[in-house]
Image (cartoon, rainbow, N blue to C red):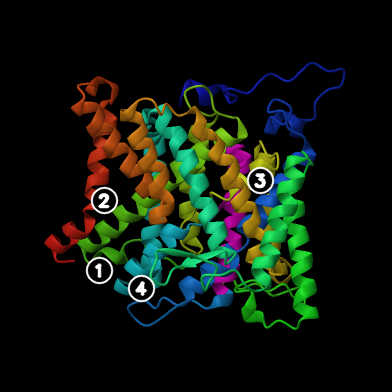
Amino acid sequence: MTQLDAKGSGPEQPAQASGTARSWLDRFFFVSERGSSYGQEIRGGLTTFMAMAYIIVLNPIVLSGAQDINGYAPTFAQLTTMTALSAGIATILMGVVGRAPIALAAALGVMAVVAYQAVPLMTWPQAMGLVVWQGIAIIVMVVTGVRTAVMNAIPHNLKLAIGVGIGMFVALIGLKNAGFVSAGEGSLLQLGTTGHLSGWPVVVFIIGLLVAAILLARKVPGAIFYGILSATVIAIAVTYAFRLPDETWGDSVPRLPDTLFVAPDFSLLFQIDLFGAWSQAGVASSAVILFTLVLAGFFDALGTILAVGNKAGLTDDKGQMPRTNQILAMDGTGAVTGGLTSSSATLVFVESTAGVTEGARTGLASVVTGGLFLLAILFSPVFGMVPGQAASCALVLVGAMMMMGVKAIDWDDISIAVPAFLTIALMPFTYDIATGIGAGIISYTVIKTAMGRFREVGWLMWILTGVFLIDFGLAGVERILGI
């Protein structure tokens, strides 16, 4: 455990003396020390949940369409229950143990590896067994100090670039989910879905974005939350007024539900096979899949934790934040939880920055977010009323505010400017956080060494460079191994 973790407070400022005793809740979550309030934490937790609630629908859509080697796939109802359950448990654990405003849910990058790389080669329980091993590997790296050492080894300027790059990535996700940009016809990206903006969903997104931005500019507490809420109300109104079909909105439809309650399906819980994948798919294939799962989860989480810490003002001048070991351990525990619930690895979510922007500074916000996920198990029709276009305005504004960190990067030093630029640019351009981090680390190591400044690099950065070179060349390695 680092000294920072042992103190449990890091760069937090001592609470100002007052005539009244602080409650145990305040002391436990460091609410006063971090300059927060219960109102901020509740608003932040609500905003984070609304920004990431789409995962309750998206994860089942992706995974229920992936058949295993026997032709089996879990049902949508099963995966909906397990996705919300896993996110709720893991996020509450993060709040109570890590005491950070970081929420967890089924990771998008890992979800794709599970659905399209692991499941076709093995049974569902065997694939979930690999996910559990992913979480165990992450926890082992935390216990041995490897993960914290990696986080501390990354230069401060690259940490800043990671935060900015994640902001760009989050903004692109928001713009894409809102239908403001899409895959281009004859170009990489295009405006709207046809080269022009059209349709009520985009209008709803723009209104929510402007409302939230205006309230932010006027320093109104809960600005982003009110932006999402206003967009949702407008979406419901136009859906009924213009009799819009459900497919207009995508996965989450802004329509009053027929019922408030849906019976949960817990039948997937603990349906795992820890050792079957290695014999079913082969040692080489299973090892490659596990390596991909660990690497994707490791660096996506590292970037997200740094970004949230910087945005919340919890990091010190070296980019380190309090209770790092506990936060990283809970990320690994989330992966194990996701495997045990058959909902894929549950890892830290970059949408947590939406809640931080609303004022969340402590684990109390995560408890609120996790509690809402657990409620969603029973009341998923209610939470399903919030369309993705409404939640997307939060992601775009978060991206704009995270962009502010770019001014602190030393752009006058080309050996820093190039790696920082690659880190920032490649996250949205490749739609992958880990790729941006890898490109930044490799270029930083190579350029600094070529300039004769290899002592500034550090041996651990060389190891990370080697790991990412293997990852980037993984397709060639698979071809050589005949996988």
Range drawn in magenta: 78-104
Frontmost residue, 226 versus 312:
226
- Give the CA distance from mark 1 to mark 4: 9 Å
**Along the horizontal axis of the image, is 67 left or right of 62?**
left
Q: Residue at x 53, y 51 (%)?
A: 170
Q: Disc 4 marks which amino acid?
A: Thr
Q: Main secondary structure of the magenta part?
A: helix
Quickly name the residue at label 3. Answer: 355
**For the residue carrying disc 2, how many other residues have a C-alpha within 10 Å: few (<14), some (14-19), or many (20+)?**
some
Q: Is residue 51 magenta?
A: no
The C terminus is located in which quarter? bottom left
Q: Which mark is residue 123?
A: 4
Q: Residues within 10 Å of mark 3 (few under 14, many from 20)?
A: many
Q: Earlier in the sequence, mark 1 or mark 3?
A: 1
Nearest to viewer (mark 1 / mark 3):
3
Residue 86, magenta (yes or no): yes
Could you say which disc has been placed on residue 376 in the image? none
Q: How far apart, in angstroms, are the residues tagged by discs 4 and 3?
A: 37 Å
Depth check, mark 1 against mark 2: the one in front is: 2
Residue drawn 79% across the image and 66% down it: 233
Using the numbered discs, state the Cα–Cα distance from disc 2 to disc 4 in whole angstroms.
Answer: 25 Å
First-in-chain label (2 vs 4): 4
Q: What secondary structure is marked by label 3?
A: helix
Instruction: Work out whether mark 2 precedes mark 3 in sequence or the reverse, and give the earlier one.
Output: 3
Residue nearer the viewer, 312 or 6: 312
- Pointer 1 residue: 281
Number of residues whose C-alpha sits closer than 10 Å to that of mark 1, classed few (under 14), some (14–19) or many (20 or more): many
Q: Amino acid at mark 2?
A: Asp
- Tell which circle, 1 or 2, labels the residue nearer the N-terminal end: 1
Residue 452 visible? The answer is yes
